[in-house]
Image (spheres, rainbow, N blue to C red):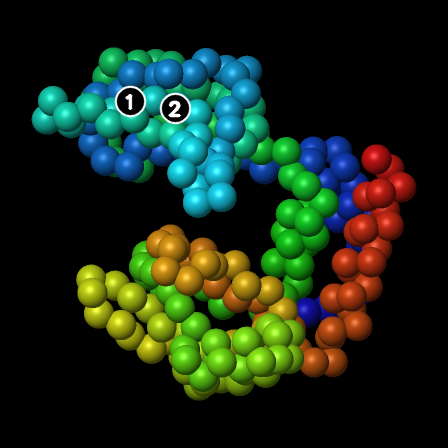
Amino acid sequence: MSDEIDFDEILGKYHSDPFEYVDIVAEHTGTVRFLVEEGREVEAVSGEWKHILGTALFEITRERNPKKITATTNGVVSEVCSGLEGRFVEAGEKLLTIRHPLKKKEIIERILQEVLIIFPAPERAKYFFSLDIQSRIDKKGTREISVKPGDEIIIMSLMKRDTPVYYSGEPGVIHSIYFQSGVSVGQGAPLIGVCPTEKLPLIQKIITRVKADWDKKK
């Protein structure tokens, strides 16, 4: 992590294009029927218990079993692969893209992900903090928890088996948490962001600068 950060370049990038482009792919093979068009505004899942489904994006039928896929992020449909309408697609094939407007908090987190030590998910699975780490977080808060290589920090739950996951990055404090306990996370997705103790002032500088600059230009 460098002490030299070109804030103007980073912030300029987000001011000129304050969006995340989320590609939506087929979860499995099947025949596709689109339910939205380009320019359509879509809503993500909502409600106190996440019980209100998002906007229906497309229907995919496999073995005469149709399944509607709904949006998990809000925004505007910026691209629809309309040539695939009514055609059989393979799992993982891109079907459409949602342009999601980034909030200030999301922009800060994305910038931090560029400078923090990111510890990624080794496999697609559900994750939990180890009992020791969770107990310390409950008592002290996340940013008081130090970790070092070899520490058992997270439990991976996969195929009804729980496996300890050991930290392998630089020593530091847990600054950011990117997963929810018991919610499935994709392979390679960030689980936590760790900051070496001596770099904490730099992180605070980033947060302060982004907040001040973003508010000023809004």
Residue type for callout 1: Glu
Residue at 68% across / 49% down in the picture? 105
* SS for callout 1: strand
Q: Quadrant of the C terminus?
A: top right
* SS for callout 2: strand
Residue 117 showing in the rendered view: yes
> Dividing the picture into quarters, in which one does residue 141 lie?
bottom right
Residue at 89% across / 41% down in the picture? 216
Residue type for callout 2: Ala
Residue 7 percent location from the top left of the image? 81, 53
> Dividing the picture into quarters, in which one does residue 160 lie?
bottom left
- Please name the residue that numbered disc 1 is placed on: 59
What number is the disc on residue 56? 2
The residue lying toward the viewer, choosing from 50 and 57, is 50
Residue 93 showing in the rendered view: no
The residue lying toward the viewer, choosing from 197 and 81, is 197
Residue 131 percent location from the top left of the image? 41, 80
Residue 96 percent location from the top left of the image? 42, 25
Residue 153 percent location from the top left of the image? 44, 78
Residue at 78% across / 66% down in the picture? 204
Give the Cα separation between the discs numbered 2 and 1. 8 Å
What number is the disc on residue 75? none
With respect to residue 34, does 217 lie above or below? below
Q: Residues within 10 Å of mark 1 (few under 14, many from 20)?
A: some
Q: In the shown orientation, is residue 156 left or right of residue 55?
A: left
With respect to residue 25, does 162 lie above or below? below
Q: In the shown orientation, is residue 48 left or right of residue 56?
A: right
Q: Residue furthest front?
A: 48
Badges 2 and 1: C-beta atoms under 8 Å apart? yes
Q: Residues within 10 Å of mark 2 (few under 14, many from 20)?
A: some
The residue lying toward the viewer, choosing from 27 and 179, is 179
